[in-house]
């Protein structure tokens, strides 16, 4: 009951929209009820306290430069997303320097190194966690420089963003799709030769949306379709979250693949990528945040109705 009360309070907080000039990796759920409650509690703790005690604490009203300078001083890691050969890629980076118009970021070493196919004047998106959510912004590449450290992955110089948007972390809660809705999903491999106009793609799978957040989703696919996916693969997906609304379509990376207990379905956990790198992507992200809140409130209303019916039934028996 306490957990539900705290969550309700968090979801009723106003969303901070942006800082101008001057909602998790999803895991396929094959759990018991107690495991699900434990997962909810862990998610809530991460929401309230962060993944560690060194997360950013930035006063509201800070401008972009103040935010960036704090990130540099705290050495907080960030994620850069960029488009290469029509496919999204992500790289972990560290903000290292702030000039009058230039922002330097250093690529952090990775286990599986591959060439960073990025060009001058190319748009990129940056996202980073802070105490109660995520900062996201779009900017462009100004220059590419070798890393000052031998073990570094190189330095990318960016334009200083004119504004930074904030997404509250409550939108990154995984929210179950309400039982009253059946949300069908089209899922396909992202390949370099395709364009957004090539829809539907030549080959795709049909699935069901199990849960969603501003950062990811979980899709359940019937194994009779012979799903052909692997961890780390980039895919495209499209679904209509609520009847009679326009569909959402975006790219994601597969983080985990699990069979259901009966072996009839495959649960695919996805991390959404690339939405912070363009105005259109951020519009999609805003819609996802609205969907998360809408699903949450539907689930809360349903839970209240069930609690009321249960209380009424118990009262009737006691009479």
Image (tube, grey):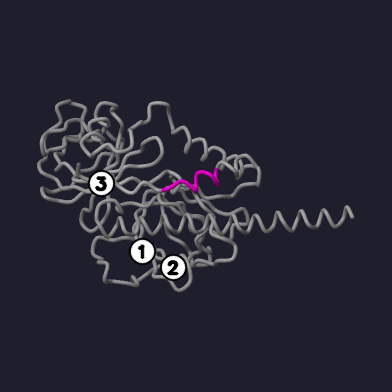
Q: Residue at x 50, y 61 (%)?
A: 209
Q: Which residue position holds label 3?
A: 137
Q: Residue at x 65, y 47 (%)?
A: 33
Q: Are marks 2 and 3 in contact (CB under 8 Å)?
A: no
Location of residue 176 by image quarter: bottom right
Kindly report the distance in space between the C-alpha atoms of the residues bearing marks 3 and 1.
Answer: 20 Å
Q: Which residue position holds label 2?
A: 240
Query: Foreground residue, 94 or 71?
Result: 71
Whether 134 is drawn above or below 315: the answer is above
Give the number of the mark in front: 2 or 3: 3
Q: Residue at x 27, y 60 (%)?
A: 280
**Magenta highlight range:** 7-14
Magenta: main secondary structure equals helix
Residue 9 colored in magenta in the image: yes
Dot 2 crowding, Cα within 10 Å, few <14, some 14–19, many 20+: some
Kindly report the distance in space between the C-alpha atoms of the residues bearing marks 1 and 2.
Answer: 9 Å
31 vs 290, left or right, is right
Q: Which mark is residue 249?
A: 1
Mark 3 lies on a secondary structure that is strand
Q: Which mark is residue 197?
A: none
Which sits earlier in the primary sequence, circle 2 or circle 3? Answer: 3
């Amino acid at each position: 009951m306490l957990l539900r009360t705290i969550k309700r309070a968090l979801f009723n907080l106003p969303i901070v929209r942006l800082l101008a000039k001057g909602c998790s990796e999803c895991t396929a759920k094959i759990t018991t009820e107690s495991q699900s409650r434990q997962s909810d509690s862990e998610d809530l703790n991460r929401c309230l306290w962060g993944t560690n005690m060194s997360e950013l604490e930035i006063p509201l009203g800070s401008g972009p430069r103040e935010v960036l300078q704090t990130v540099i001083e705290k050495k907080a890691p960030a994620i850069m997303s960029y488009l290469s050969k029509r496919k999204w890629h992500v790289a972990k980076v560290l903000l290292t320097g702030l000039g009058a118009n230039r922002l330097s970021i250093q690529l952090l070493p990775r286990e599986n190194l591959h060439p960073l196919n990025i060009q001058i004047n190319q748009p990129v998106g940056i996202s980073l966690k802070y105490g109660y959510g995520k900062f996201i912004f779009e900017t462009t590449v100004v220059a590419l420089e070798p890393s000052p450290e031998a073990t570094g992955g190189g330095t990318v110089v960016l334009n200083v963003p004119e504004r930074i948007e904030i997404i509250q972390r409550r939108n990154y809660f995984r929210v179950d799709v309400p039982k009253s809705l059946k949300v069908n999903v089209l899922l396909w491999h992202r390949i370099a030769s395709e364009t957004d106009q090539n829809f539907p793609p030549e080959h795709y799978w049909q699935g069901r949306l199990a849960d969603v957040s501003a950062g990811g989703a979980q899709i359940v696919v019937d194994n009779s379709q012979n799903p052909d996916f692997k961890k780390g693969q980039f895919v495209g997906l499209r679904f209509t979250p609520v009847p009679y609304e326009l569909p959402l379509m975006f790219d994601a990376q597969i983080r985990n693949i699990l069979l259901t207990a009966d072996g009839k379905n495959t649960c695919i956990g996805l991390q959404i990528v690339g939405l912070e790198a363009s105005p259109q992507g951020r519009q999609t992200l805003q819609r996802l945040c609205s969907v998360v809140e809408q699903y949450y409130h539907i689930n809360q209303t349903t839970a209240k109705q069930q609690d009321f019916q249960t209380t009424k039934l118990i009262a009737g028996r006691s009479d």
